[in-house]
Amino acid sequence: MLATVRAFVGGFLARYADAERIDDVRVAVGEACGRMRGDDTIVSIEVDQARCTLTCEGVAPPGEDDEDAMRAQLLEALADDIEWLRDDAVRFRMSLSV
């Protein structure tokens, strides 16, 4: 399922950003969706000029173990304005230009 989410994001953003930037967004989405809760994950993308806002629903925030800590650090390094909504969704923003 995670591969499908990454492919969707990459395909959608192909008309808005170059390949390097799309790869960064795909990695960020992969980290945000690293703890999916079942098959009900929904990813929404909004593009506004040179930025995109992504909302991932049906995902759990990072836990306390080392792997989750690394996930959180990578997401924080790539994305801006990360906001965990409730306990099953995250919203973050990324630039589409280098």
Image: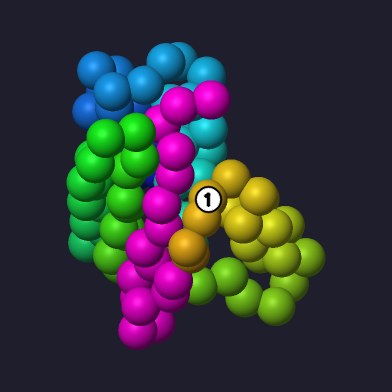
Residue 37 showing in the rendered view: no
Residue 56 among those drawn in magenta: no
Residue sticking out furthest to the bottom: 86
Q: Is residue 6 above or below residue 36?
A: above
Q: Is residue 87 above or below residue 77?
A: below
**Magenta residues: mostly which secondary structure?**
strand
The residue at the point 73 percent across, 72 percent down is 65
Query: Which residue is nearer to you in this view: 78 or 33?
Result: 78
Query: Which residue is nearer to you in this view: 29 or 41?
Result: 29
Looking at the rendered structure, the kind of residue marked 1 is: Ala
The residue at the point 44 percent across, 38 percent down is 95
Residue 92 among those drawn in magenta: yes
Residue 89 showing in the rendered view: yes
Label 1: state its secondary structure.
Answer: loop
Query: Which residue is nearer to you in this view: 38 or 19?
Result: 19
- Start-end of magenta stretch: 83-98
